[in-house]
Amino acid sequence: MKTKILMVCLGNICRSPLAEGILKSKVNSEQIFVDSAGTAGYHIGNMPDIRSIAVAQKYGIDIHQQKCRKFSFKDFQEFDIIYAMDKSNYKNIIALTSNKKDIAKVKLLLSESNTEITEVPDPYYDKDEGFEHVFQLIDKACNAIAKKIQ
Ligand code: 4NP
């Protein structure tokens, strides 16, 4: 059976689409299913932010076809691991369940990498450098995940 991994941020247009695209580029899609969602519904149906599309493209990853969706309670049934980009996302996800098994599925993405930084910062109000920084943080964590699960 496939392992299903969900990447979650606030808007599902900047960080989690990058995390989805980056992890997909490192794992075998026959073994691992990767998706992303946002805890807020501001941008449902939209494509990722143009700055996320650009930084992904710089590293040979195409995320332009992704469509924003909102995280839902059903995702606890669907997914094996749910990665939150920051502590606020983590709290918003956990607030939707009181089931211990569901809660155990939720982790901070950067808990997978050996960095002092524990959260992927929200780059929405940043310039392009913010997106480069976010890409590098996510890339490092996804390398660790890919190594662990394959
Ligand atoms: P994301 O970034 O959570 O990484 O997708 C954001 C995108 C949009 C907004 C905030 C953060 N917003 O307020 O619309």
Image (cartoon, rainbow, N blue to C red):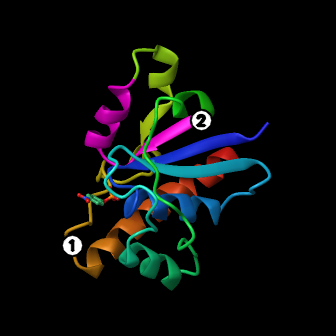
Query: Which residue is tagged 1?
Result: 126
The number of callouts visible is 2
Q: Is mark 1 on a helix, strand or loop?
A: loop
Distance from Cα at disc 2 to Cα at disc 1 = 31 Å
Furthest-front residue in view?
45
Q: Is mark 1 within 8 Å of ligand 1?
A: no
> What's drawn in magenta, residue-wise?
79-96
How far across and how far down the image is residue 92, in percent? Answer: 31, 34
Amino acid on which the number 1 mark rests in the picture: Asp
Q: Residues within 10 Å of mark 1 (few under 14, many from 20)?
A: few
Ligand 1 rendered quadrant:
bottom left
From the image, which quarter does the N terminus lie in? top right
Say which mark, if any, is on residue 42.
none
Furthest-bottom residue in view?
58
Which badge, 2 or 1, comes first in the chain's sequence? 2
How far across and how far down the image is residue 40, in percent? Answer: 32, 46
Say which mark, if any, is on residue 79.
2
Residue at x 58%, y 75% (from the top left corner) = 62
Furthest-top residue in view?
99
